[in-house]
Image (tube, rainbow, N blue to C red):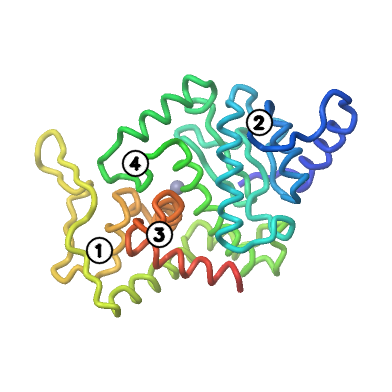
Amino acid sequence: MGGRGAGSRLTNQTAAGQSNTAGGTVKNLDDAQTAQDVSLWLASKGYTFGVSPTIDKNIPVRVLKSGAKMVMRLYNELGLDPSSTFLVRDLDSDEHRPNAIMSASFYGDINYNPLFYGSEDLANQRDEKVAKAKSGWNPGEGKDHTSDIAHELGHSIEAYLIAKRYTNGAVGAKRLTADAVNAWTKHTISTEIIREAATALKKSGYKVTKWPWSYTSPDGKVTGWDNKKLSPKGTSVADYVGSVSGYARTNRSECLAECVCDYLMNGSSASRMSQEVWRIVKREMKK
Ligand SMILES: [Zn+2]
């Protein structure tokens, strides 16, 4: 969970923009040709997040534009003022975890892994892979690469809620306290949200009759990813978690991220669990 000085991106890029007489801010985000165009456009609209000046230069601008659009949509859906939140700080690549396609840091950085996004070809391959997938492992299957950032934004939401609760409101700086680290590693807030959503669904009478994913190992012995089955009533927390996606069962933070991804990618056709989680997330972000 390393971090850099907050605010350095905007300072650097505004200065760079002002000294570049050939540059200036593009009118529409779609006209952006460079990572800096994307950042300057976002700043001109009052957004406090942008593209890190140190992002891997091989990540296609179209990926940064679609990422920025997803972040803006999230702010919009949550009713957040662009200037009043540090939910997301940077689109970046330097803190990606080696095996993760993308990762979110506690400080609001969303990192693209150049091994999956470091060229137009790789980004196209990522689009094709997501579009063709239909295992139920992720809720963004059948869509495109933007389902990756939609998932990471779920982690950003949890980090934001942790910062609000445990760092004396210092959301922007996100100074880590022992309590915040503990909540991040122990999935404290996501566990609360998932439990509340499951309780509400149970109360409403909704039962899970089938998980939307399937897997059989080559030897035929392991089914359902980890060989667990729905409980007889279909109303346990695990039943509702499994109704989101296969990956949602990893831990409660991943479940929260999958619910946010499901909502952002599928809207009203997202799972009941994802929609219930989204309702709670919205409420908690407004508090
Ligand atoms: Zn995740």
Q: Are marks 1 and 3 in contact (CB under 8 Å)?
A: no
Give the percent coordinates (x, y) of residue 175.
70, 57
> Mark 3: few, some, or many residues within 10 Å (few <14, many ≥20)?
many
> How far apart are labels 2 and 3 at the CA level?
30 Å
For badge 3, the amino acid type reads: Arg
Identify the mark at residue 264; answer none if there is no mark.
none
Q: Is residue 228 above or below residue 103?
A: below
Q: Nearer the viewer, mark 1 or mark 4?
A: 4
Identify the mark at residue 252; answer none if there is no mark.
3
Q: Residue furthest bottom?
A: 203
Give the percent coordinates (x, y) of residue 277.
42, 65
Q: Which is more toward the observer, 107 or 285?
A: 285
Residue underneath mark 4: 141
- At a point 58% along the width and 47% down the height, the residue shown is 105
> How far apart are labels 4 and 3 at the CA level?
20 Å
Give the SS element for disc 4. loop
Q: Which is more toward the observer, 3 or 46?
A: 46
> How far apart are labels 1 and 2 at the CA level?
40 Å
Give the SS element for disc 1. helix
- At a point 47% along the width and 28% down the height, the residue shown is 116
Q: Is residue 122 left or right of residue 75?
A: left
Q: Nearer the viewer, mark 2 or mark 3?
A: 2
Identify the mark at residue 55; answer none if there is no mark.
2
